[in-house]
Image (spheres, helix red, strand yellow):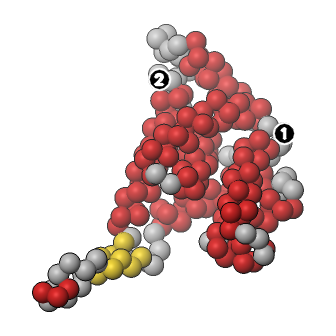
Amino acid sequence: MEVNPNLSDKARYDYDLVQRAVKGDQKSYAELMGRYRDAIYFMLLKMVNNKSDAEDLTIEAFGKAFKNLSQYSPNYAFSTWLFKIASNNCIDFLRKKRTNLVSIDSANDDDNEHETPIHLKDELPDPEEGLIKQQKAVLMRTVVKKLKPRYRTLIELRYFKEFSYEEIAIELDLPLGTVKAQLFRARELLFNTLKSTDVKLD
């Protein structure tokens, strides 16, 4: 495939990594993730203003990008393509988050005029949301079994069984702050484990 002659040296290097990754080179996957993980995370953090959501969306963005890596065209920089995937996925996340909240307004009595509306989450399944969760689970399962037991348990409870932080704290008899700190560390290890795994991500 012809490479855009206007690409920077950095973009050309990324394209070489993409080509090697498509052929199954796991170190290239890990290097691509290492080059852009922090930038993607901080961009998403500004969009959602929630560290946990930003971390989850970062994983989703790389999962989607790696799954569709063969579709990347060197007409533009890989970073442009990756950031577009991440931002579009985040916009979808925010849109669904708003859509799934059904506003129940209080009665129009004068006494209740200034009461705060109650929001109930719509429990109807969303096919696209289910697909995103499935893609995220596939990416995680390829590396989670490489983690130490305590981190593996945290990841399984949080993402596979969808426990809340509070439920995990009760299940493992740990302080809530410890659960959050160890989950953050577990996510870091998920990224780092990619450097040594021989499991393909697509």
Q: What residue would you read off at disc 2?
A: 76
Q: Up-down: is 194 above or below 131?
A: above
Residue 32 found in image quarter: top right
In three-dimensional space, the C-alpha distance between marks 2 and 1, rounded to whole angstroms, equals 29 Å
Q: Amino acid at mark 2?
A: Tyr
Residue 57 in sight in this render: no
| Mark linked to residue 196 | 1
Q: Position of residue 145 (x, y in %)?
A: 83, 57
Q: Could you say whether the residue bearing mark 1 is in a helix, strand or loop?
A: loop
Left or right relative to 153: residue 109:
left
| Residue at x 41% of width, y 64% of height | 97
The residue sitting at 39% across, 79% down in the picture is 120
Locate residue 62, reporting x and y percent: 60, 43
Q: Residues within 10 Å of mark 2 (few under 14, many from 20)?
A: some
Q: Which mark is residue 141?
A: none
Q: Indicate the position of residue 18 as horizontal and vertical percent values.
A: 64, 28
Q: Residue at x 28, y 78 (%)?
A: 117
Q: Residue 12 or 22: which is nearer the viewer?
A: 12
Which of the 4 image quarters holds residue 132?
Answer: bottom right
Q: Nearer the viewer, residue 67 or 118?
A: 118
Q: Which quarter of the figure is the N terminus placed in?
A: top right
Task: Indicate the position of residue 61 as horizontal and vertical percent values.
Answer: 55, 45
What amino acid is at disc 1?
Ser
**Does residue 5 show up?**
yes
